[in-house]
Amino acid sequence: MSEDRETPDGATAGDSLLKPDESKDSVAEVDVSDSRVLAKPDSKVEVKYVNADSQNGDAKIDIENVNVKVFAGMGKEELMRFANDPFWVRTRWILFGLFWLLWLAMLVGAIAIIVLAPRCGKKAQWWERSPLYEVNVRSFKDGSRMADGIGDIQGMRSKLDYIKRDLGVDGVILSSIYPTGSDSSPESVTDFKAIHPNLGTLDEFKELIADMKAKDLRLVLDLVPNHSGKQHKWFQDSIKNISPYKDYYVWSAGKGTNQKNAPPNNWVSVTGGSAWEWNEERNQFYLHQFGTGQPDLNFHNPAVKEEFDGILKYWLGLGVSGFQLRKSAFLVEDDKLQDEKPDSHSRTTHDNYDFYNHKNTKYLYNTFKLVGHWRSLVNNASDENILLVKDEFPLLDFKHDGQPDKSTAAAGDLLQTPDFLQSIPSKIVVTDLSKSIQDAIARTPSHKPAWRLGSESNQRLASKFSSGVAEGLMMVTLLLPGTPIVYYGDEIGLKDINQDVNNRALGPMQWNSSSNAGFTSDAISPWLKGISPAVTNVEAELKAEHSTLKTFRDLVQIRKTMVAVTAGKTNITVLNATRTDGTLANNSILAYTRTKSGNPGVLVAMNPSREELNVDFGHIPGVANELTVHAVTTNFAHKDLQVKSKTQRDAVKLPAESGITFTFVYKGEED
């Protein structure tokens, strides 16, 4: 310890610190018992009194050379005593075991969550989110510079904004665009890789595809692969036995000595009469399951299959998004040409198509395999491509060699019962309509069929039904599971024209109120007459506050934006209702819900009767007390039930021949 310095009063500095009460000016205290400061025996600690004149009795003290002893932990020997202690050994093993048990439990839990947690539903394809709009090019819009009264590709290009913006649809089915020579039938194709000159050029078609892609529209081409036209080069060379085309078609010698008068078997054409036609040059019969000008191709020949593989690849390469196959049920026939057996339920004569069961000419197993092959080809080009099959494939009860065969379910991306609404009588029975819808859903393996509202071969929707019923049926089909296919003009209530049965539904599209409805120049006669622009046209429908077209557009938006419609469950029911006089109207209302847990539900209802009815929707499971109106048919007269208004479920007034669509808060169980 350094020597203490004496203060003026004779005391040392240390004495001043240890006896603060003797200092008059300031006090400094050092607590040597403080365990935080430990001095080694040989260390030197210097305490300096810095300022005796500090204010408030404070003093600054410097303590120098203080060595702080830091805890260095246990030594090796001490540590080993604990390490070998039985208590700590057991503790370590217990903790080690608990660690791995917890780790294993977390692993099992993670796996359980992955396996048992509800899976995200498969994203709906574009053709499930939007209806397909089917256009007959000849009747849609004449867009050529020198108007000729025939719709064409340029006319299609000029109306793409209408399809995308005004209707809101994302896909178009284009009718047959292939050349047909002198034959007027669009199915008598002379070149499956070309454009009919009346409709445009290949360059114009490419421009159409480019325009559609720019607007996020997709194009599906109509195709009939079962037959070609007689003027096709393949058939002309086949007549002459020129290779490789001599076996591109189904040829056969006749029966008996006078083969010319005796066809190979009793097969009957769909149009009636023998399905065989004699050819003098080849001295054989050729098969035609349809008209004599449409010889059937021989798909038992691998070369023919390769030809059509190439045709599909050609159009896919140009940018189309798929194909609609028609009459594909007839692709493959019995290669032994065995006679058909009569249908035991038929009431017709032997020269009528319905007299036989057609097990040797229709829906053969190899037909399904061929269509399935084409589906794979189309899908391999892009997983967003579609193969639509417009045939009534009996998929769920098909048998191969006597055994059930479900592989045919892969025959197409989208299957349909042709012209679904055409099977419905003009006077609707609600229970029958409900059964037809449920049967169509059940028969399709995916439970998502195509719903065809109309076609070129049947009455138009607005001609077969009243305007209210036609619009109500459109509402019903647009929100069902699957894909609605809308025939051009049905969205404005276009009716049949005064033509023969084959052309009545091919009337030109009516765009405005001019004499030719904006389809072509007023100075030119349309290719088919019978336009009635004063009755209905697109321009008037767009200007009207409430119209069939606007209802259609509202329903399309519901389909595109509501998860319950594209991925939800469907519950179809028939409800009783009450007339205005209080009497009961049994089985009078068709209703269905589309529901998906965690999403708003959709309720669609239709009253096809000719009287106003009061309906209680509380009988339908999952329907909330409060309903919000989303769309109504144009004849909906009740002002308290207009779009965006709310109502209670237990007392809804439905006018005669009307339809309505609600949304509601769905609180059902997990799907």
Image (tube, rainbow, N blue to C red):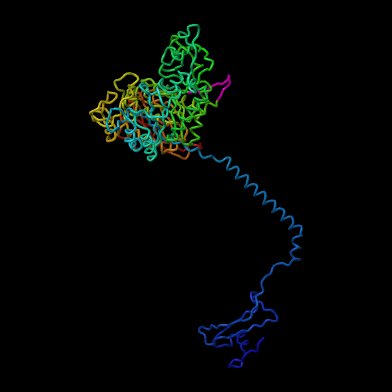
Residue that extends furthest to the top in the rendered view of this protein: 257
* Residue 641: image location, x then y, percent: 33, 34
Q: Main secondary structure of the magenta part?
A: loop
x and y, in percent, of residue 106 in the image = 62, 47
Q: Is residue 590 visible?
A: yes
Q: Is residue 103 left or right of residue 464?
A: right
Q: In this view of the protein, can residue 353 be seen by the observer? A: no
> The N terminus lies in which quarter of the figure?
bottom right
Residue 303: say if magenta. Answer: no
Q: Position of residue 322 (x, y in %)?
A: 44, 32
**Camera-side residue of 5 and 140:** 140
Residue 594 found in image quarter: top left
Identify whether 250 is placed above or below 376: above
Please check the rendered image and state whether residue 398 is part of the magenta-colored stretch, yes or no. Answer: yes
Quadrant assignment, res 218 = top left
Q: How many marks?
A: 0
In the image, taking residue 33 as reference, residue 592 lies left or right, namely left
Q: Nearer the viewer, residue 292 or 104?
A: 292
143 up-or-down from 61: above or below = above
Comparing 53 with 284, the one in front is: 284
Q: Which residues are magenta?
A: 393-405
Q: What's the residue at 27%, 23% (across, down)?
A: 530
| Rendered view: 571 above or below 77 | above
Residue 18 horizontal/vertical position (percent): 62, 84
